[in-house]
Amino acid sequence: MTFQSSLFHYEEDLSPLSEAEREVYEAVEQDGYGMREYARKTGRSPGTVGNLLRRARRRLDGGEHA
């Protein structure tokens, strides 16, 4: 018997991220927004978006915990 794969099986576990980190990570890494584009869309500075994205990537790589 073979099981069909679903996209759910390949979704990354974003639970270690804060709400803001998760929001930015999903927008940039998964939805294809550019950092500056997403900063304009949300009214954040590009530096803030970049910092949130960097922290999210670090946490997902196991480097930093909340």
Image (tube, rainbow, N blue to C red):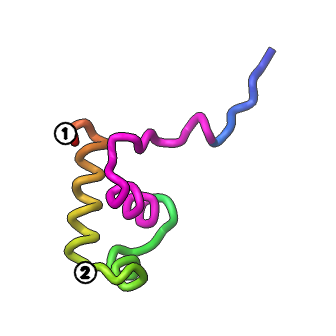
Q: Are marks 1 and 2 in contact (CB under 8 Å)?
A: no
Q: Residue 52 placed where, x, y %?
A: 26, 62
Residue receiving disc 2: 45
**Main SS class of the magenta portion in the image:** helix
| Distance between mark 1 and mark 2 Cα atoms | 25 Å
In terms of depth relative to the viewer, which is nearer, 16 or 32? Answer: 16
- Horizontal relation, residue 4 to residue 65: left or right: right
Residue 38 tag number: none
Range of residues picked out in magenta: 8-29
**Relative vertical location of residue 13 with respect to residue 3 in this rendering, above or below:** below
Q: In which quadrant is the N terminus drawn? A: top right
The residue under the point 33% across, 57% down is: 21
Q: Residue 4 placed where, x, y %?
A: 75, 30
- Horizontal relation, residue 5 to residue 47: left or right: right
Instruction: Determine which quarter of the picture holds residue 34.
Output: bottom left
Instruction: Tell me which amino acid carries mark 1.
Output: Gly
Instruction: Determine which quarter of the picture holds residue 2.
Output: top right
The residue under the point 23% across, 47% down is: 58
Q: Earlier in the sequence, mark 1 or mark 2?
A: 2
Residue receiving disc 1: 63
Instruction: Tell me which amino acid carries mark 2.
Output: Ser
Toward the top, the furthest residue is: 1
**Relative vertical location of residue 12 with respect to residue 40 in this rendering, above or below:** above
